[in-house]
Amino acid sequence: MIKAETKGMMVSVKPEYLEEQSNPMHMSYVFMYTITIENKSDFIAQLLRRHWYIFDSNGEHREVEGEGVIGETPVLAPGESYTYSSGCNLSTELGKMEGTYLMKNLATEDFFHIQIPEFQLITPGKLN
């Protein structure tokens, strides 16, 4: 599991290749990732937006921005965590993702970004 902590918010990522949904003959490789955000700070925070950078090994790059995650804008009190799963389709067997979440400290009304650590998207056996 890959982890990064920013301003008391720990983001953990676990990627997984979905072989049954992929179609290598048509250059379609589907990955799922599960993210847990844990509030280790002493304030209540809300996740407002996401900004992803997605890279294929053939040099393709795309960005995805939007409100919340999977249609939600979770509020996390100190000690609470939020877990969700989402997916990504690549045209190559190797890739990576990274990004940021825009958060809001609900006590001070201040906005801040937290890091989503870079993680690799790799089909099984590709690096053997």
Image (spheres, grey):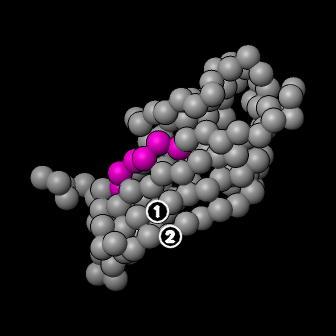
The residue carrying mark 2 is: 62
Query: Within the magenta stretch, is there residue 37?
Result: no
Instruction: Give the left or right position of residue 103, taking residue 127 as reference.
Output: right
Please give the range of residues in magenta.
116-121
Q: Are marks 1 and 2 in contact (CB under 8 Å)?
A: yes
Secondary structure state at the residue bearing disc 2? strand
Residue 9 at what x, y percent from top left?
62, 29
Q: Main secondary structure of the magenta part?
A: strand
Residue 49 at what x, y percent from top left?
71, 52
Q: Residue furthest bottom?
A: 26
The front one of 71 and 7 is: 7
**Type of residue at label 1?**
Ile
The residue carrying mark 1 is: 54
Q: Looking at the image, can residue 75 be seen?
A: no
Q: Quadrant of the N terminus?
A: top left
Residue in view at x 30 percent, y 56 percent: 122
Image position of 30 with respect to 79: above or below: below
* Label 2 Cα crowd, 10 Å radius (few <14 / some 14-19 / many 20+): few
Q: Quadrant of residue 7?
A: top right
**Type of residue at label 2?**
Arg
Residue 89 at what x, y percent from top left?
45, 68
Image position of 93 with respect to 91: above or below: above
Q: Earlier in the sequence, mark 1 or mark 2?
A: 1
Instruction: Give the left or right position of residue 102, taking residue 1 as reference.
Output: right
The front one of 31 and 62 is: 62
Residue in view at x 50 percent, y 60 percent: 53
Q: Looking at the image, can residue 70 be seen?
A: yes
